[in-house]
Amino acid sequence: MSEYRSWQQREADAARTKADAARLAAEAKLTEAQAAAAANQGETEALAEEVKRAKLNRQLKAVQQGEKDAERARRGRRREEREESGYWYRLTVTVLAVFGLAASFPGQLTYFLGLGPAGRTPWPMLSVPPFLELLAWSAVLGTAWARRKGLPLLPFWIMTGVLAAVAGSINLWHGLTEYGPVGGVGLALASVLGPAVWEIREWLIAQAAVDKRSAAQRAAEKKAAAEKKAREQREREQDAQRKAMFPEQYKEYEQILAHVPPGTLTRDEAWAEAARSIAFPEVHKRYTQLLTVPGAPARSVVWASAWRDVEGAPVGVTADVLRRRLEAEGTLAGVIAQADLTPERVAVEMLLQDLFPAAGGGDEGGTGALSRGGPHGGGEGGAQSAGALDGKGLQAPERPLEEADLEAVRKLAEALGDAARLSATNVRKTIGCRSDYAVRLRDAVRDEWKQAGR
């Protein structure tokens, strides 16, 4: 008989069962999450290990590539050193000499051994071929030793030539008899050319030992020599043009270069001096006199002294130049005084006309400030225009007259004795103001004097 349970107990059991199921599900999910995390961690570790392995492989490849590059560089340097020292040429000459000796020695040996009567071998002749060949090569080696010691080489060259000619003649005669013309010539060349090419080899080695320049240095010097040759060619062409176009200057130019030590003057400096000698003969005459004085300073200083002695002024200034300059300055001062302008004012007005070209005239009748007879628009008492700006319909505001400035101008008029002697220039210098303001101050004081009956 089953135990009776109330509905509250049954609901509690159901809730407990549901909670256990949720707990078990949560535990299952946690277990799955832990398993996934462990799997991810394993994958991460595996990936990190793979990255580490790839990094090590790259480093290993870089080291291996570096070793290969270093080995290639070493081989390149070794090849360059061999080419620089003539290694392959010397080796080839050595091989040629060995083959030449191997060809000529048996030929001489068979020749001398065949000189005896029939059926008898002349054994004493056995040592003659090596004697002749070694004698020629001893002369060759003697030449190399004499070259190193600085001894005369001619005796060794003569001995080498004579002995090589003897050996070559013997091989030529024997070869013609035994093998025909081609064989005879071949054996003769084997005896002669071996010592000859060896002598050339030793001579080249000696020359290379004296010349310590690298290939880059030789190339640079060769380029510099070519540039120097081209420059000298251009200078010759220029001298020819100068001589044809300016014969007098060129004659002086040659005399100047002939009188100075080499390297003292450049060609351009000498040509400029020759041009001055033609343009200013009296100054140049005094200049040459001063140059002969012991302990004379630099040529430019001497020329300045000679110019001062002859012309009485700094270099480039003569009496005519000074007269024209003074006349021009006087004319300019007169124009400025008449127009009541200053050079600074003229420069400003010209700048304004450049910036605002419409002020120079047009359909509206506007004109620049300078075209109105001065910056004051007309007569001496007119107010100054706005310069180049009033060509565009603009009017600059006038500065009010300050009492302190008027008092200063009154004192100036008292000092001059008459307000009529006031000018815009002396007012401007007294106050330190612009010309238009000075004109207004001057006119105001003049009006005060007129009203006072003075």
Image (cartoon, rainbow, N blue to C red):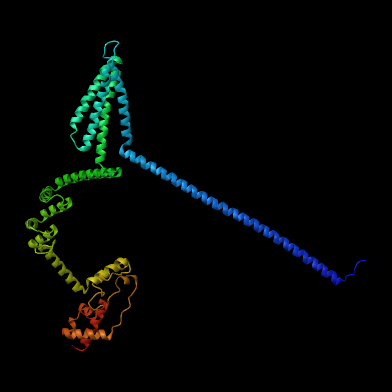
| Along the viewing direction, whichever of 295 and 376 lies nearer the viewer | 295
Percent position of residue 399, x then y:
30, 80
The image quarter containing residue 132 is: top left
Percent position of residue 430, x then y:
22, 80
- Placement of 298 over or under 328, stated as above or below: above
- Placement of 284 over or under 123, stated as above or below: below
Tell me if I can see residue 214 in this picture. Answer: yes
| Along the viewing direction, whichever of 130 and 335 lies nearer the viewer | 130
Question: Could you tell me which residue is drawn at 26 percent across and 40 percent down?
Answer: 209
Horizontal side of residue 435 vs 262, given as left or right: right
- Placement of 443 over or under 107, stated as above or below: below
Horizontal side of residue 4 vs 401, given as left or right: right
Image quarter in which the N terminus is found = bottom right
Question: Could you tell me which residue is drawn at 73 percent across and 63 percent down?
Answer: 26
Tell me if I can see residue 371 in this picture. Answer: no
Image quarter in which the C terminus is found = bottom left
The image quarter containing residue 417 is: bottom left
Marks counted in the figure total 0
Question: Could you tell me which residue is drawn at 80 percent across and 66 percent down?
Answer: 17
Percent position of residue 41, x then y:
62, 57
